[in-house]
Amino acid sequence: MARMHSRAKGRSGSTKPIEKTVPSWIKYKPNEIEALIAKLAKEGKKPSQIGMHLRDVYGIPDVKSITKKSISEIVDAKGLSLEMPEDLLSLIRKAALLKKHLEDNHKDKTAIRGLQLTESKIFRLSKYYKESGKIDATWKYDPTKISFYAE
């Protein structure tokens, strides 16, 4: 499938194994993994950071194959989820950083186009999350009030 804005058909990237079996080296039970995820979420880590931490420190390659639930589902069940989905937050942060860059470099046409594409993705993703109920239906992306994300 082609990329959304570039028409490129990238083939690079890692793929998960087709086999959904639990690797033999994992000594953790599903409830232990859920406790680890809850502990890391209480520390303020995002679901993607939790997954990388479990992979790198504990040697758990795939949480879903062991617990039959994703990290986000476990975090939501424990009541520790973020107020906004992680992918939407990262897009807003990217837009804020681009706006900050454009304040100093107002003739950077590539950055202007990148900001347009990023804001377009924010609008589409927020529409999806409003329809699915993950964010409030009255939430609105305001480009003028996103400067606190550029940190």
Image (cartoon, rainbow, N blue to C red):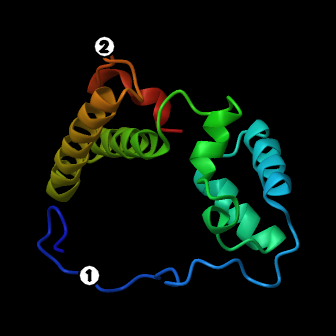
Q: Crowding at label 2, few (<14), some or many (≥20) Cα neighbours within 10 Å?
A: few
**Figure check: 42 above or below 79:** below
- SS at circle 1: loop
The residue wearing badge 2 is 138
- SS at circle 2: loop
Q: Residue at x 14, y 55 (%)?
A: 109
Q: Residue at x 66, y 60 (%)?
A: 51
Q: Position of residue 78 (x, y in %)?
A: 71, 34
Q: Nearer the viewer, residue 54 or 91?
A: 54
Left or right of residue 4, residue 14 in this image: right
Q: Residue furthest top?
A: 138
Q: Position of residue 92 (x, y in %)?
A: 38, 38
| Residue type at numbered disc 2 | Thr
Task: Looking at the image, tell me whether mark 1 or mark 2 is earlier in sequence order.
Answer: 1
Q: Residue at x 29, y 25 (%)?
A: 141
Q: Crowding at label 1, few (<14), some or many (≥20) Cα neighbours within 10 Å?
A: few
Q: Quadrant of the N terminus?
A: bottom left
Left or right of residue 144, residue 74 in this image: right
Q: Nearer the viewer, residue 37 or 103?
A: 37
Which dot marks residue 10?
1
Q: Quadrant of residue 132?
A: top left
Q: Quadrant of residue 41?
A: top right
